[in-house]
Amino acid sequence: MKIVMLGAPGAGKGTQAKMLADKYAIPHISTGDIFRANMKEGTPLGKKAKEFMDAGALVPDELTVDLVLDRIGREDCKNGYILDGFPRTINQAEKLTEALSSQGGDIDFAVNVDVPDESIIKRMAGRRMCPSCGASYHVVNIPPKKEGVCDRCGADLITRKDDQPETVKNRLSVYHEQTQPLYDYYKEKGLVVDVDGTKPMEEVFKAITDRLGE
Ligand code: AMP
């Protein structure tokens, strides 16, 4: 099963993507995670991506498309995958469609996790992550056992630079301008599954899997 996650940054699509990857035993491919791992390792890609990410802007398509097409061509993707954070522009979506149609296929579902902007701004203000192992938390919704400390590895939690309020506003306007048109793109193909992302995590997950099947 090949799935694309749609929805604004902070809508909870990453959390759902991880749960879906477990359920369907397919890889969860998050372009944001790939860029952050590269930044942490100080690779040339990470250095280039950092300036865009810190500003809440999109990393240019030249740095993004081939990376994803290469990743989905690997052996562990032969039964499908979940793309989280890609595509984010119509150009990226077209490149993905072209690559898949050259193999005679397309994605199976575009899951749209819908959350209004006001709720997103509130959610992101509470988001924390572990700079050491990458675990994510939320001060209200998914608090660590000890405040400010990672349950998994004991490191001090941080607020991602791109989760700071000003950057969040910028990311949302980038989303509305460049990424939201993907909804219509996949709707026209009849692939969209809409879910209400303001509901509790387990309910959102059930709504998605009811539509995708066992
Ligand atoms: P995310 O973790 O998905 O919210 O991504 C964090 C940041 O990584 C975004 O704000 C962008 O700067 C960058 N990024 C992730 N995926 C893409 C993509 N498909 N195209 C361009 N930039 C991306």
Image (cartoon, rainbow, N blue to C red):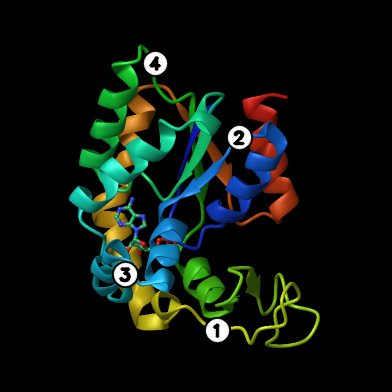
In percent of the image, x 70 and y 77: which residue is there? 140
Ligand 1 neighbours mark 3 (CB distance < 8 Å): yes
Q: Confirm or reject: label 2 Cβ below 8 Å from ligand 1.
A: no
Tags 3 and 4 touching, CB below 8 Å: no
Q: Which residue is mark 4?
A: 105
**Total number of numbered labels?**
4
| SS under mark 2 | loop
Residue at horizontal 39%, vertical 21%? 106
Q: Is residue 201 above or below residue 195?
A: below
Cβ atoms at labels 2 and 1 below 8 Å apart: no
Q: In this rendering, would 39 be left or right of 59?
A: right
Q: Nearer the viewer, residue 194 or 99?
A: 99
User: Disc 2 marks which residue?
Assistant: 26
Asked whether, in this view, residue 108 is left or right of residue 154, the answer is: left
Q: Which residue lies under the disc numbered 1? A: 158
Q: Quadrant of residue 53?
A: bottom left
Q: Amino acid at mark 4?
A: Gly
**If the image is split into quadrants, where does the C terminus sit?**
top right
Q: Nearer the viewer, residue 99 or 84?
A: 99
Give the CA separation, mark 2 to mark 4: 17 Å
- From the image, which quarter does the N terminus lie in? top right
- Where residue 137 sits, quadrant-wise, is bottom right
Q: Is residue 199 left or right of residue 56?
A: right
Question: Which one is in front in this view, the residue at disc 2 or the one at disc 3?
Answer: 2
Is disc 2 surrounded by few (<14), some (14 to 19) or many (20+) residues within 10 Å?
many
Disc nearer the start of the sequence (2/3)? 2
Q: Name the amino acid type tagged 1.
A: Ile
The residue that label 3 is drawn on is 53
